[in-house]
Amino acid sequence: MMYVGTSNISFGLILKEMDTLATDVGYKYVRQRKSGVRDNFKVITAVVDRMDFFDKIRSNQDFKMNGYVMYVSKTSFVVGIDMYRKNQDEDWKFIGNASYILAARTMDDKPYKVPQLSFTGEQDLIQCKTRFEYGYHVQADSKANKGFSQYKSSPTDDESAEIHDLLFALHQQRQFSVEERRAFVPIEKTANSSYVLIQPQMNVFGNLSSGGYILKEAFDLSWLTGHLFCERMKFQFVGLDRLYYTTPVELGSGYELTSKVAFTDEDYFRVNTSIQNIVPSQQNSTTEFNFTFRFPEGMGKRKRIMPSNYDDALTYLMNKRMLNKFLF
């Protein structure tokens, strides 16, 4: 589980730097394995997999990240990132890790064959083998579940009964006291949006080969949505669902980001954020970001998110399923 304290820290920037580090590791791997190779290729982020933080990131401590290649296939590879923190007179403490799937492409967007991974000269072969097997699992699982959506699964009998109770409770709000009505928040009432124009200085290849900038923008809007939902009380970032980048983000394009609180329980709430090109193009698509946060400890009675239509009800159920999968 991801657990991060973000007081006085821009966690969106940390996510952006993690993506930059993963991409940099990819470039260095290909260059070092192919002697004399020129930069006739590019490395792009295809999937952001697990991110796990076992302790807080504190603003008064040093923080570092180490990146390394775990697994390599024909034209893609898995990069792991380990994170550490330390006080001035202490040793580095391991606090979390993450994994990325990167794809190598030629400059005209064709698959680029990358060198195979070799453990020759490595001192710890057991660790190399463990990382290799984990990287293989990450890539295989991401391929198996690409395109999978909880929307494709119909509600169970228990879920249908739950949705009925929620919609009925929302219908009966007029009979509640003012305090009781404040505890029920329709999903649509939590919505926020922002716009971003992709600037030339963000890129060197004509599109965003690294998804770090977009991930930062999505996280910042999700954080704002949570900030308003929690009535400006401090809450904690818990995790990000597996994220697929399906199409490149083009320079000069305008994008709309929309965000809403989609599910709550006693301890957590989930924010769904999407980004979509607002200018018609051949690669017009939507990327979904699903974040999990922990309610503030001193908030008292938690707000309860409520679907007000069937589409919001499916969103509610999907996020409940994904939270249970993420936690257990």
Image (cartoon, rainbow, N blue to C red):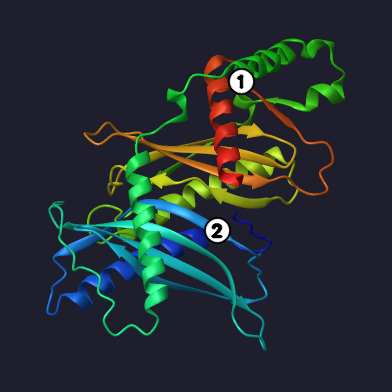
> Residue 55, position in %: x, y?
65, 65
Please identify the quarter of the rendering in which residue 76 is found: bottom left
Question: Outermost residue toward the front?
Answer: 126
Q: Earlier in the sequence, mark 1 or mark 2?
A: 2
Which residue matches tag 1?
159
Q: CA distance from mark 1 to mark 2?
A: 29 Å
In the image, is residue 93 above or below residue 165?
below
191 vs 241, left or right, is: right
| Number of numbered callouts drawn | 2
**Residue ID at (50%, 38%):** 273
**Residue ID at (70%, 50%):** 235
**Residue ID at (37%, 62%):** 133
Q: Nearer the viewer, residue 5 or 200?
A: 5
Residue 306 seen by the camera: yes
Quadrant location, the N terminus = bottom right
Circle 1 packing at 10 Å, graded few (<14), some (14-19), many (20+), is some
Which residue matches tag 2?
52
Quadrant location, the C terminus = top right
